Amino acid sequence: MPSQINQRRLALEAARLMVERIETEYLHAKERAILLLGLPYNTPYPTNRQIKEYIGKLTRSHLGPEVMAARVAEMRRIAEEIMTVLMDFDPHLIGSTLSGQIRDSSDIDLHVYCRHHLEVEERLRSFGYEEVEAEYVENQKGTFVHLRWLETGYPVEITIHSWDQRGEVMISSVTGKPMKRADLDEVRKLLNGKGMV
């Protein structure tokens, strides 16, 4: 029982660190939380999903349900605009903007498919998205290009995948299950109150 209590304390503290933008990665938040709480190093880590649940609770408590719902709607509207521009690249919305479980630092996460990331950058610029920056990211899943910028105050991140990855099932680092994704039609249904997450 004490280990379960410590695990819950650890999940809550890690969530607080992420909500307050002290940490942005789940693993780093867990590591810092153990130190801050003075827990034994062998305390079992909570899952990313447990931390995400606390993030949702803390954010709802901090922002209030009305503000949170308005932000989610605005972020989905921005996602729909960008996805319309990138329709030829099979865009999908993922993450907290799709689930509605945002925090203050949440971004609008999209996946697109193309031969080269410059195709997507050129399309965005031709529609007036001028501040797009490309970043190469390497992790256990491979090397990816992320396009990032701020759109009306909300961070946008687009992960570029090659067309041959289009049929691959992406696994969520939070749930360990197939990632929930929404195409343009599904995002439009969400905005019209007819879709389900």
Image (tube, grey):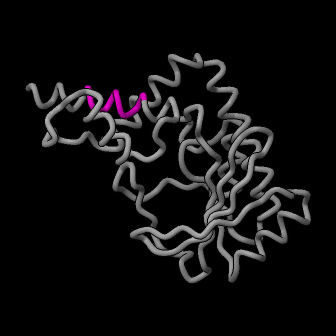
How many numbered discs sit on the rendered protein?
Answer: 0
Q: Residue at x 40, y 32 (%)?
A: 15
Vertical placement of 84 versus 36: above or below?
A: below
Vertical placement of 184 versus 9: above or below?
A: below
Specify whether residue 79 is painted magenta: no
Question: Is 93 situated left or right of 29 in this image?
Answer: right
Which of the 4 image quadrants contains residue 104?
top right
Which of the 4 image quadrants contains residue 73?
top right
Question: Is 86 situated left or right of 69 in this image?
Answer: right
Which of the 4 image quadrants contains residue 147?
bottom right
Query: How far across and how far down the image is residue 42, in percent?
Result: 13, 42
Q: Main secondary structure of the magenta part?
A: helix
Specify whether residue 11 is painted magenta: yes
Vertical placement of 16 versus 192: above or below?
A: above
Query: How far across and how far down the image is residue 129, in percent?
Result: 85, 57
Vertical placement of 175 versus 124: above or below?
A: above
Query: How far across and how far down the image is residue 89, in percent?
Result: 72, 71
Q: Residue at x 71, y 41 (%)?
A: 154
Looking at this rendering, what residue extends furthest in the left direction?
A: 1
For this rendering, which residue is in front, 159 or 73? 159
Q: Residue at x 35, y 44 (%)?
A: 48
Q: Residue at x 34, y 55 (%)?
A: 176
For this rendering, which residue is in front, 145 or 89? 145
Question: Is 63 situated left or right of 87 in this image?
Answer: left
Which segment did they paint magenta?
9-16
For this rendering, which residue is in front, 144 or 89? 144
**Picture quarter with the C terminus:** top right
**Picture quarter with the N terminus:** top left
